[in-house]
Image (spheres, rainbow, N blue to C red):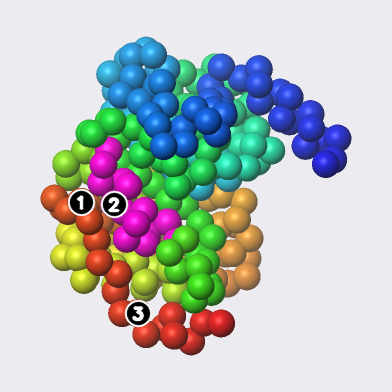
Amino acid sequence: MGKDKLKRFQENLTFRNMVQPAFEEVFRKDYSLKGRWGSDFFGNDHPIVLELGCGRGEYTVALATQFPDRNFIGVDIKGARMWRGAKTATENSMTNAGFLRTRIEFIDSFFAPGEVAEIWITFPDPQLKKSRVKKRLTAPAFLASYAKFLAPGGAVNLKTDSRHLHEYTKAVAAINSLPVEVACADIYGSGMAEGILSIKTAYETQFLRQGLPITYLRFSLGERTSFEAPVFEADDQLA
């Protein structure tokens, strides 16, 4: 492990805005902050928004800057990457941005029913192998986890360069009759990239330089608690 990575791991331990539970604290059990993020972590009752797979936390920090009356939590397993977001938020004395280092598979161990107002998924790994379809962050099993804590009517936002993931998620929404508010295959080409959609991560900047269109999907889970998998023919072409 490189010295820079070790240094970041050590500094993460000093950040008040970084939560890094041990495996045994969350495996098949509820974490101590579940249902108490507002009172015990943020110290207010503002709506909580998650960014899943936050990477360097660029979206989390930018959203927290734009919306001081909301609390934002970036979630990822890569501590060395999250260091950047946690450090930026700390240096700017931001009280409405936090970071949670954990696997998304454990996410419902952290939040109580109705505790989360909205979810952002920005440029996740599209898992472009047929054997890994279930690992997509918009796959039915993950949506079932989100449904356990997402407030009624709460939106799920997917912003990605992967047309495949975009279309797959649309197929998931269609087969489960999920309300879709926005579906755009090219936010820059359509002129939709304004406001919060104009926030650019390092990955997004790279994809734009390559000429890749950036897609966006905003949908809610309705009243469903379980979800069917679609027959998505494009997956049959994957290795």
The relative height of residue 66 versus residue 214 in the rendered view (above or below) is: above
Q: Earlier in the sequence, mark 3 or mark 2?
A: 2
Q: Residue at x 53, y 30 (%)?
A: 24
Q: Position of residue 77 (x, y in %)?
A: 58, 42
Task: Give the mark nearer the N terminus: 3 vs 1.
Answer: 1
CB contact under 8 Å: marks 1 and 2:
yes
Residue 227, can we see it? Answer: yes
Q: Label 1 crowding class (10 Å Cα cut-off): few <14, some 14-19, many 20+?
A: some
* Residue that appears at 33% across and 19% down: 36
Amino acid at circle 1:
Thr
Where does label 2 land, which residue?
A: 144
Question: Which comes sooner in the sequence, label 1 or label 2?
Answer: 2
Q: Dot 3: few (<14), some (14–19), or many (≥20) neighbours within 10 Å? A: few
> Which range is magenta?
136-149
Q: Position of residue 208 (x, y in %)?
A: 57, 64
The reply, left or right, for residue 71 in relation to residue 26 is left
Which residue has dot 3 on it?
232
Q: Nearer the viewer, residue 141 or 153?
A: 141
Q: Which mark is residue 225?
A: 1
